[in-house]
Amino acid sequence: MKLPDYLQQGEVARLFPVLADTSKEGRTTSIFLSCLSSIDELAVQMLKSVGAKVGKRATLTCFTEVVFKGEKDAKNDRPDGLIVLKNGSKEWRALVETKVGTAELRADQIEKYRSIAKAHDIDCVITISNQFTSLPANHPMREVQTSKSKIPVYHWSWMFIVTEADLLINTGSVADTDQLLLLRELRRFLTHESAGVRGFTRMPAEWPELNKLVSAGGKISQRSQEAQSVIGAWHQETKDLSLILSRQTETSVSERLKRAHQSNIVLRDKEALEVLRDTQCLKAIFDIPNAAAPLELCADMKRRTIDVGMTLSAPRDKKSSKARANWLLRQINTDQIDDLYVRMTWPGRSEDTQFTVKELLEDVSICEIGKQNLQVLSFFVFNAKRLGARFTQQSNFIVDLEKVVPQFYQDVGQSLTEWRASAPKIKADRQEATDVSIEALEEESTDAAGE
């Protein structure tokens, strides 16, 4: 295929690139971009996430190792890829910069590509690495977010790409059998260690020190660099968790974010720091399609526990709190209840109460002690996993977190059902009244016809 007129150098993305064994990054990039241009549904999903619409008659071409005409420093001014989408007479283009393994993106390099994009009317820059972000528009690097450049920079983590491929395969969304085979091979390749793709694996070096401060009763300062580093890592991990849950449930699980946080990563970090200072907790909420309630997560640094659970409104058609609690207990179909608790919310200023599921199964009436004249309003059923010293360890904390969260949802969350009021029913006396009215109308009609 002939290169576009504006390129001095480049090659069409190859499914089987001929590259040196040491060029892991180039090989992974070429294979992905080749599949992106060859699998219709993958192109639609990925480009939709960066605001580009792929029409039915659109053509998509991807190039690697591109150099634009007029660029003096071809060696250093060479983006890893270029995506060209043509919809009729319109053309949308994006520069691509990738990193694999432990390599991280560089802000200065991204700014250079922004300059190239501006000079050649390129619509945006897309970065791909093992770093995570809540949304493609929220770049993981703060320097990129706060740059004065008007060229948008979007970000895909490699695991985001793997997850999108996985969902397309498992939901039967790829119509063409050859394209489906190709997508399966892409997933297989990206999940092999040779591709250099990995999930979030460890908290930063500041994690143990911040835990020591909290354990000693110290207060996290408002400008703590250690806390800011930890929060940045936490947000990467929660995104990875949402992708893990997406692959396991075969649905698109997303983090619940405030509208302001979706477009302002700095504000999100600032408010997360305030929550951490006030509660010594790192928090996140996940929306799982059709689940009874959002999945709530709290990593409590003071208690060194991971709390994960769901909140259900108590059924209003049951009068006693005991009956309401039994309604919840009947939905818990697991024997793994050692660390399972229920926190109950009551009307007015009445304090919450908390019991283990084991205690409630043995004698549910204990929930009414001291609350005889009240009706429980809601239940927070949750797993409180105490990690001890493992909580403060950079890698073990992530390992345990990624085990505890999906396990709770599998054991408990997926079996829960939210309460809904029953549909109104026609009472017997009302039905009789309706029948009498109909008979009277029929008689009137007969009399009128006789006259």
Image (cartoon, rainbow, N blue to C red):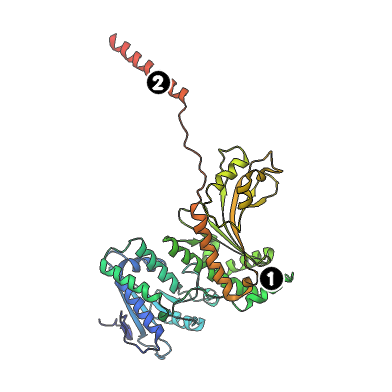
Q: Secondary structure at mark 1?
A: loop
Q: Secondary structure at mark 2?
A: helix
Q: Residues within 10 Å of mark 1 (few under 14, many from 20)?
A: few
Q: Is residue 112 above or below residue 123?
A: below
Q: Is residue 426 above or below residue 334?
A: above
The quarter in which the N terminus is drawn is bottom left
Residue, x 48% and y 55% (percent of image)?
414
Q: Is residue 316 above or below residue 96?
A: above
Could you tell me the amino acid type at mark 1?
Gln
Q: Quadrant of residue 273?
A: bottom right
Residue for badge 1: 222
The quarter in which the C terminus is drawn is top left
- Mark 1 and mark 2 lie on one chain; the one further toward the N terminus is 1
Could you tell me the amino acid type at mark 2?
Asp
Q: Residues within 10 Å of mark 2 (few under 14, many from 20)?
A: few
Residue, x 67% and y 43% (percent of image)?
368
Horizontally, residue 76 falls left or right of residue 273, namely left
The location of residue 217, given as percent across then percent down, is 74, 69
The location of residue 78, given as percent across then percent down, is 40, 86
Residue for badge 2: 435
